[in-house]
Structures are given as C-alpha cells and as structure tokens.
Image (cartoon, coloured by chain):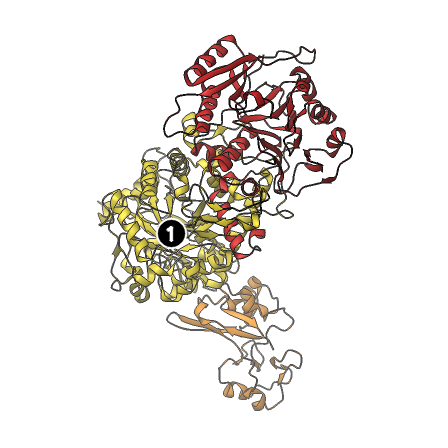
C-alpha cells in the first residue's frame, strides 16, 4: 500500500501540514471558515515534532501489525480492505482510549470536537493524496508505495 | 542628538480578515519580523526587521501577507535620496564598510535591452526546432587553427571514412547547452544549494562551479560536471580537489567586486564548511585581494602551467576576470598566458558579500566587455586559442542568445540559478540568514532547500532557456549554435549611441546587411 | 553605371545555378550552358548573370588571367600602374563583347595576362596574387577583379544570364568546366561586380541561397587575413574554400564536411575513429559552418563540386553522361543541354557531387 514517508532532513517546521489537515477535517473544508467560523475548533491529525532544528511531521503510520486493531474493544478500529489504511469508525467508537494507550507512535488523539471518540489520520479518504503531502512546501513528506 | 536608526525598508501588510493566526510566518522568519504575542493572542509584525525576501508571503496559507516597500519618504531630492540618507545613517552609527549581497542594483544601462534579434522571412526559410535537428552542443577550450589529417587517394578519390586524424585536441569541456552555473562557493551557499547545482548540471549535461570554497566530500561523485576553482585564498585546494573536476578555474576577479577577494563572514563557517575550506570554524574567510603569487601576467602563466603540470595536462585551465576598463588587453594577456578559457564577469555579476560601494561602482557591463574582448582576440588572431565565457546578470534566454551572438562561447548564470531555487534577490546573503535556505549555513534554514526540488527547478530552467534558444535560432534559419557564435549580423542596436554601437560591433535597427 | 553602387550592403538573392564539366578535360563551347541557364530564366530577374569558364586560355595557361571591370578610365590607369609594379605584362586587351540591346551601361571590361614579380621570401605566389586582388577590390575606387586565376575566367554583368553570355560571345570560347548563374537579388540595385560567379585565383563559385551564418563566417575569415569587401555570400564561400583547400590542404570531401557539417547526432553513431575525426573537424571549424539555405557550384581548374546545405533547403540535381558531369538547380536545365543522360540523382544535403579532371 501507499504510505506517507517522512523525510525529516527536509522538514522546515512550518506546520502547514497541520493547518491543511485541520482544514481537510473541518466541516467547511475552507481554510478561513475552518479557522475563524467553526466551533469547536477542528483538529489536525498530524503533529510536527520538533527539537531544535530537527523536525518532522508525524501521523498514523498505518502499521502492518497495528496494535490499535488488537486493542479496540468495539471493533471501531479497522483496516480498509481497499487501501490498507487503518481507520476508526466513528459510529462504533466508544472512546475507551485503548488505542491511544497502545499506539507506539502516539499519533492517535482524543477528539476535541465534541464527540468522545478517537481521532487519527485517515489518509484523507477520497483525496488523490493526503493534503499534508500535497501541501508540504518542501516535499518533506511524500506518499509512496 | 537623538540617535537615529536606519529607516524601515519594507512593510508587511497583513490582511486581518484572512489571517488565521496559524503562525507559519512566525516560525519561518529568520529575522524574527513576525512574532506571536501570547498576551494579545495574535501575530505582530515588526516591519523594520523585514528584508523583503518574501518567504512568509510565499508560505502564508491564506495569502494574507503582502510585502511592500516602505513608502515613508524624505523630501524629494535627486541627490540626497532615501538610499543616500540611509547609507550615511548606517555608517554614522557603525563606522563600518557597508556590505551587501547579489549584483549591482544601480540603474546603469542594460545593453541587452537595446539589442534586437533577427529572424528569417521569405529569402531564407526559418527552421522548426520541433521537426528538424537544432544543435546547441558546445565545446569549451583551446582549439588549433587547422586540422591535420592523413588521406589516401584511391582512383583519384578520397574515401572520407578512411581519413586518419593527426591533430590531437587538448581536453575540451563538452556541454549540451551553452549555459553553465557560475562559481558559488560552499560556504557562501548551502550544502543543499551546492547539491542542487551539481545534480542539475548532471541532469542537463552542463557544468557547475565550486567557487573558491573547496568541494564537499559528498559532491565528488558529480566530478564529471564540476569545474573546481582556485582563488587567492586557496581555500580547500589540495591535490584530490584539483583532480576532481573536469577543469580548473583560476579566479582573479569577480564582477561584483573587482579588485578585492572573496568575503565569507565567520557566521557562515560551520563545521562542515570549515572542513571543506580547511579553516577554523567561525573564522572569517577573507581572500587576499590579489593572488600573492600573481603580481603580473607572467606569474599567471606560471600558475596556469603549474596547475597543468599538477594535473598532467588533462584539464583545461580557465581564468576568470572581472570586466574592468582595460578588459580587452587583459583578456588577451590571459589567453596568451595559456588559459584554455577566459571568463569575463560583468558589472552586474553577483556575490555572497561585497562592499556596497564597490559592487555598485566598480567595473563595466558585460555586454561591452564581451564585445571588446571578442573583437580584440579576433584582431590578434588568438580567438581560437581560448573560449570566452560571459557572466554577470543573464536574466533570460534572450540575454544568453545575444551574448553568444556578440561572441561568447557559453555563459555562466548565477543569480538566475539562485532565483530558480527560490531566491528573491533581497541582497542579504552576507548575513547568513537566508530564509530560502540558499545563502546560509544555519541548520534551521539550510533544510528549507530540498535538493531534489532545487535540482529539478534548475534543470527546468536550463531546459526552458535551451528550448527558447532553439526557437530563436530556428527563426533565424540557423540550426547550430556554432553559426550564431560571434555572428553580430544577427543583432541590431536600438537606442544606442554611435560609440556604443562601435564598441558592440552592431548596426542600428533598420539597417540591412 | 552601377559598378559599385551597393557594395556597402550585403545582398540576399535567390538564383538558378548550372555547371557542366568534362572530366577528360575536353573543351566545349559556351553554347550549351547558355541554353541550359536560359531555360531557368524565371529563377533570375535580369539583375545579374554570369559564367565561369575553366580551360579557356590554353595558350596563356602559365599566366594569371585578370578579368577586370572598371567604372572609369582613371580606375583603369591606377590599376594598371599597380599591376606594373608587381607583375610582368604578358598581354592586355579588352574582352571582346557584342553590343546587344538587352545589355546596357556596361563598364570597361579588360583582361590582363600577368606574371608576378618581386614575390616576398615568405609569401607563396598564390598569397601574392590574393593580396593583389584584396588590394584592388578594397583600395582602388571603381575597379573590380572579376577573376584572377590561370587558364580561366569569369564573365558577368547586369542582365539575364543568356544575354550576358551573348554579350561576352561565350560561344567563341572552349572550356572543360562551365558554370553559370542567373540572379534574383531581393533588392533593386544591381551592379556588375556583384553578379556571380565570384572568382579568386582559379576558384569560382556560383551560389543560390542566403547564408545566415554570414556574420561569423566573415569574422572567421578575417582572422586569416581575408577581407570580405563585397558583402556577398559568394565571396565568403569562395574564401572559405580557398582557406580550407588551398591553405589548410583539406581534400574537398573533408571541406564539404566543414561547410555542411555532420550533425552531432550522426557523429555520435559513427565508429570511434571516425567519430573523433568528425568531432575534431567540427570543433576546429565551428565558425566555418555555412548555415542557411544554399546550393553552391564550386570549381577550379581541376574539379567541379556541387554542394547543398546540410538540410537541403535549396534545390540541386546532379547527372552524368559519359565523361560529363552536370549539376543544376533544375533537372530541366540539364536535359536542355543533354536530353539523354546515364544517371540523374538528387544529392543529399551536405553530400558533395564531385567532378574531377582525370590526369
């Protein structure tokens, strides 16, 4: 499957990936409305980790052997048969946070938009490539086989 | 008196309706012009710190920023301009030489814009480069006056396939297009910028130039597309380095700062730069103004031949000089001293750091320098003995084509290459704070230039210009760059004085052949 | 009279060209070539025509035959004074002409058979003669050297070529190489000296085309002491071949590869040794490449060569019949002179057709 590959040597720490991820996961999907007109504030599913000049964008790795799948009580966390992406079915999620506990990368977060559910990268379902990749100004994250 | 500080040069206009307080601008500005004030919960811009590099404007996801020149004005005065006042104020404060980067920005005449190119109509057909061969391949180096061959007569005829070649050419540089990347040292520009240039040169079948900063150990793999430079500071020069490239270039002068040596501020001498240059970390690398082993033309000859000896006559040796008043006889001397090619760097040639007063006032435009050098070498019958590479402010393929018609074998592009990599010509290279990750060694900034993207953009530029040159050549009915080189009949002057036209060897527009 | 009127400008022109050679050196009259070139009348416009004839002065074959055009008696006197300083006069006479209504305003037309004297120690006889030609054309007002070789001559002027031929009574001459040219200059001013063929020593050149590389070819030749004072393509073509063949001793086959260079893409496909040869040839002679459309017929006392530009932008047809070689802009002109041919072909761009005198 295609994965998001991190090239930390080119990550400039601008966090445009976070901004575009947030917009993609907002109601309006329009940047100014998403930031200025949506409450609760939409949240990004990618985080830029930074220590001094080393930085990189981190989102769900969609592990082959994903612990979150094992740990999920309700069966909300599942693997998409077509794309191989690890997705959270928001209708089934009961917010037990087991996935958050077991994720080795810490890339699953509590949703802060109101519902008590887990929130994670969905590889921008329906988009040609994830918006973080598309909008990275320096190709520090790429979407590859 | 009240202490004055230099006035604000730029205003960054922020459209508050569009600004989403995402702080990309704050994170990205190396000059700290944008700061997020926690107390106010908003981004504040300190205009005075802006250098006009447009990095924030480029990255702003909502297009909320616009960098403008400050409109604060002093009383209109043709003599005491805002710039004059600013410079004096700065110097009154510091007592220092004003420094700058890039090439001369003064409004001297740009002669390229006073030359027009010819095209065919009726009497000879123009050629379609998409359908017919169109040759840009160029050889740089010493060419003998004539060929020596051995032929065998058979029934009074000669079979061309049995002709034997006696002439042995000295090593030539072969480039697929007459555009090369100018000398820009590792130190003045970043590792990623050097890598971009090297890769692009390889992809485009042309050459890049190490400048006077030595060659980073990782870049030896691009040796086949590298010219190594030897300048007065001899930074990073050792046996392996001399043997690394396809040619060695002795740098006597640079268009941006004729008469003085290279300046690399200590801020830019990082661990890696220090190793490559063979100097201590953080030390200023100030090249001597002259080469202290070249005080005359015969000394230059000795260095040329010392380098030839050192590389067993396998590498062409070039000499780069700045375009100064006496450029024609100097170039002639350089050719006679044994240089295989001579680089003429004009007034508008760039630099990583130079005293502003020198950059803006010393030297002459490349157009005139090139024309008089080519004419002089022909008059003296030595034009074959060396190739001419012109440098200094080539902005587009039209400039390149005009330079070749004036007599250049090839051109060097520096500033254009930097612009392709993102540079907005803010002239702050000497600060080491280049937001575009080009003219800096700061690890926060250097990674902003991804060499894959850099190389691709440079290759695109070379490809685009080469294609345009082919189109223009085709229009003239010429299918080889060989027939354009020195063919001043293909140019006409517009709006120039008789003296200018005489120097450029051009007829006025409207005059037929 | 318009002998020199437009000599300060380069003139572009389109034309018809024709060349006939007998490879055994058998001389034949000018009748035939006049007939052939007349057929291509629509390729010229009456502003220039001319002929080169090789082998016409067997009785004076050891002397340089200078065909001269003078606009004034003064020019003639000055030129003769100059000749006297440097040459022994063997013979001097007006070139016989026939007054016909089609040809007007003819200049003074003389020929001189000369033997050089006082040649410098470091100068070859050819260089000596070339410098004479350069001097007269450059420095003597209203005088023009039409040809300067041994046992040959150029006959040219303003008019249709067949009229020029009748004017010069060419049917009375016998030559083993004849070349002819009808001119269609794209400007209206025409002058006698600017008509083709162009001659230097025993080189003659007729040419149909426009050389876009003229600017650099001219500057290249200047490096070698040639003064291009007539601003015609034919002049630079002549000097180029003189440089390549006489001075640089290249065989015509290789000289052809200079003026119509092999494409780099083709050179890349050649076997290693050939590749090096052609690469070297192009590197050294890059400024001698003739770029732009041309069909040229080049001749000297030993050969006649037809050659096209390398992408063949002007017509050139070749033919053979027994020991005759023909090259022409059009096949019809060849057929007009010789209806039944052994072989007719269209040479490729850059591929020379060579007729050689058998010794």
Frontmost residue, C32 versus B129 = C32
On the image, the x and y values in percent for residue B360 come to 33, 41
Query: In this image, B334 relative to C144: left or right?
Result: left
Query: In this image, C334 relative to B480: left or right?
Result: right
Image colour for chain A is orange
Rendering quarter of residue B196 = bottom left
- Residue occupying the point 53% across, 81% down: A108
Frontmost residue, B277 versus B169 = B169
In the rendered view, tell whether residue B22 sits above or below residue B161: below
On the image, the x and y values in percent for residue B351 come to 35, 50
Pointer 1 residue = B316
In the rendered view, tell whether residue C332 sits above or below residue B141: above
- Which of the chains is yellow? B
- The residue sitting at the top extreme is C73
- The residue sitting at the right extreme is C339
- Residue occupying the point 67% across, 18% down: C172
Query: In this image, B202 relative to C198: left or right?
Result: left
Pointer 1 local density, CA inside 10 Å: few below 14, some 14–19, many at least 20: many
Q: Is residue C208 visible in this depiction of the protein? A: yes
**Quadrant location of the N terminus of chain C in the rendered image:** top right
Rendering quarter of residue B56 = bottom left
Query: In this image, C174 relative to B14: left or right?
Result: right
On the image, the x and y values in percent for residue B70 come to 40, 46
On the image, the x and y values in percent for residue A54 come to 40, 71
Image colour for chain C is red
What SS does tag 1 mark? Answer: loop
**Quadrant location of the C terminus of chain C in the rendered image:** top right
Frontmost residue, B70 versus B486 = B486
Q: Is residue B43 visible in this depiction of the protein? A: no
In the rendered view, tell whether residue C165 sits above or below residue A8: above
């Amino acid at each position: 499957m295609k994965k998001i590959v991190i090239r930390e040597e080119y990550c400039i720490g601008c966090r445009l990936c976070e901004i575009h991820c947030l917009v993609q996961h907002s109601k309006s999907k329009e940047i100014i409305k998403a930031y200025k007109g949506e409450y609760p504030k939409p949240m990004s599913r990618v985080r830029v980790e930074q220590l001094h000049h080393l930085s990189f964008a981190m989102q769900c790795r969609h592990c082959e052997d994903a612990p979150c799948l094992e740990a999920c009580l309700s069966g909300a966390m599942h693997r998409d048969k077509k794309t191989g992406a690890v997705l959270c079915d928001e209708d089934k999620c009961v917010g037990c946070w087991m996935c958050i506990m077991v994720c080795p990368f810490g890339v699953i977060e509590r949703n802060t938009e109101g519902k008590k559910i887990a929130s994670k990268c969905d590889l921008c379902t329906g988009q040609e490539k994830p918006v973080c990749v598309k909008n990275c100004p320096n190709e520090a994250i790429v979407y590859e086989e | 008196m009240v202490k004055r500080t230099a006035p604000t040069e730029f205003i960054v206009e922020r459209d508050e309706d569009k600004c989403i307080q995402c702080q990309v601008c704050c994170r990205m500005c190396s000059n700290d012009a944008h700061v997020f004030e926690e107390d106010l919960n908003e981004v504040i811009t300190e205009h005075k710190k802006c250098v006009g590099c447009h990095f924030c404007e480029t990255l702003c996801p909502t297009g909320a920023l616009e960098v403008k020149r400050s409109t604060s004005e002093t009383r209109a005065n043709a003599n005491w301009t805002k710039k004059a006042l600013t410079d004096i104020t700065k110097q009154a404060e510091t007592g220092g030489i004003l420094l700058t980067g890039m090439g001369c920005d003064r409004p001297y005449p740009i002669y390229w814009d006073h030359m027009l190119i010819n095209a065919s109509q009726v009497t000879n057909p123009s050629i379609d480069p998409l359908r017919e061969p169109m040759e840009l391949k160029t050889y740089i180096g010493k060419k003998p006056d004539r060929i020596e061959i051995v032929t065998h007569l058979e029934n009074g005829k000669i079979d061309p396939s049995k002709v034997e070649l006696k002439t042995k050419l000295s090593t030539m540089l072969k480039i697929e297009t007459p555009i090369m990347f100018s000398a820009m040292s590792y130190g003045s520009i970043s590792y990623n910028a050097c890598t971009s240039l090297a890769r692009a040169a390889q992809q485009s079948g042309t050459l890049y130039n190490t400048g006077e900063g030595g060659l980073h150990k990782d870049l030896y793999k691009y040796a086949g597309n590298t010219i190594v430079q030897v300048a007065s500071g001899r930074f990073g020069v050792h046996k392996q380095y001399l043997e690394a490239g396809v040619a060695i270039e002795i740098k006597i002068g640079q268009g941006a700062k004729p008469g003085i040596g290279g300046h690399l501020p200590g801020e830019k001498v990082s661990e890696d730069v220090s190793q490559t240059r063979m100097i201590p970390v953080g030390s200023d690398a100030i090249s001597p103004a002259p080469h202290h082993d070249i005080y005359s033309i015969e000394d230059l000859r000795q260095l040329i031949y010392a380098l030839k000896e050192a590389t067993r006559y396998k590498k062409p040796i070039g000499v780069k000089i700045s375009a100064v008043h006496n450029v024609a006889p100097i170039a002639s001397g350089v050719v006679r001293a044994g240089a295989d090619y001579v680089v003429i760097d004009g007034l508008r040639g760039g630099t990583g750091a130079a005293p502003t007063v020198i950059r803006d006032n010393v030297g002459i435009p490349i157009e005139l320098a090139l024309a008089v050098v080519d004419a002089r070498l022909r008059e003296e019958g030595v034009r074959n003995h060396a190739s001419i590479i012109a440098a200094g402010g080539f902005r587009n393929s039209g400039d390149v084509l005009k330079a070749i018609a004036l007599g250049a074998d090839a051109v060097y592009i520096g500033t254009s290459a930097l612009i392709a990599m993102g540079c907005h010509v803010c002239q702050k290279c000497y600060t080491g704070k280049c937001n575009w990750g080009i003219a800096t060694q700061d690890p926060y900034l250097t990674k902003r230039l991804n060499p894959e993207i850099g190389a691709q953009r440079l290759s695109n530029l070379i490809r685009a210009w080469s294609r345009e040159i082919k189109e223009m050549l085709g229009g003239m009915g010429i299918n080889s760059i060989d027939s354009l080189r020195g063919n001043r009949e293909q140019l006409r002057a517009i709006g120039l004085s008789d003296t200018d036209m005489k120097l450029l060897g051009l007829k006025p527009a409207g005059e037929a052949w | 009279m318009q002998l020199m009127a437009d000599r300060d400008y380069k003139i572009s022109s389109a034309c018809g060209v024709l060349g006939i050679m007998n490879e055994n050196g058998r001389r034949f009259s000018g009748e035939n070539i006049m007939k052939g070139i007349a057929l291509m009348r629509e390729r010229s416009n009456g502003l220039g025509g001319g002929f080169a004839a090789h082998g016409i002065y067997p009785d004076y074959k050891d002397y340089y035959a200078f065909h001269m055009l003078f606009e004034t008696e003064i020019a003639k006197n000055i030129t003769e004074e100059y000749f006297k300083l440097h040459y022994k006069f063997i013979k001097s006479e007006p070139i016989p002409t026939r007054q016909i209504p089609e040809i007007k305003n003819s200049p003074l037309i003389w020929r001189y058979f000369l033997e050089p004297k006082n040649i410098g120690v470091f100068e070859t006889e050819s260089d000596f003669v070339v410098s004479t030609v350069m001097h007269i054309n450059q420095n003597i007002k209203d005088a023009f050297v039409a040809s300067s070789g041994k046992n040959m001559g150029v006959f040219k002027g303003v008019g249709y070529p067949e009229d020029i031929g009748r004017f010069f009574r060419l049917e009375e001459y016998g030559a083993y190489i004849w070349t002819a040219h009808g001119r269609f200059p794209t400007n209206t001013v025409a002058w006698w000296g600017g008509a083709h063929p162009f001659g230097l020593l025993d080189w003659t050149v007729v040419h149909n085309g426009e050389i876009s590389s003229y600017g650099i070819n001219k500057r290249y030749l200047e490096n070698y002491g040639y003064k291009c004072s007539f601003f015609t393509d034919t002049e630079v073509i002549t000097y180029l071949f003189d440089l390549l063949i006489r001075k640089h001793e290249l065989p015509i086959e290789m000289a052809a590869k200079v003026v119509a260079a092999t494409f780099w893409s083709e050179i890349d496909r050649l076997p290693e040794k050939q590749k090096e040869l052609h690469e070297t040839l192009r590197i050294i002679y890059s400024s001698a490449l003739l770029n732009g459309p041309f069909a040229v017929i080049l001749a000297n006392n030993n050969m006649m060569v037809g050659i096209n530009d390398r992408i063949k932008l002007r017509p050139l047809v070749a033919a053979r019949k027994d020991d005759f070689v023909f090259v022409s802009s059009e096949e019809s002109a060849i057929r007009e002179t010789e209806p039944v041919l052994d072989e007719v072909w269209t040479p490729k761009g850059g591929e020379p057709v060579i007729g050689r005198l058998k010794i």
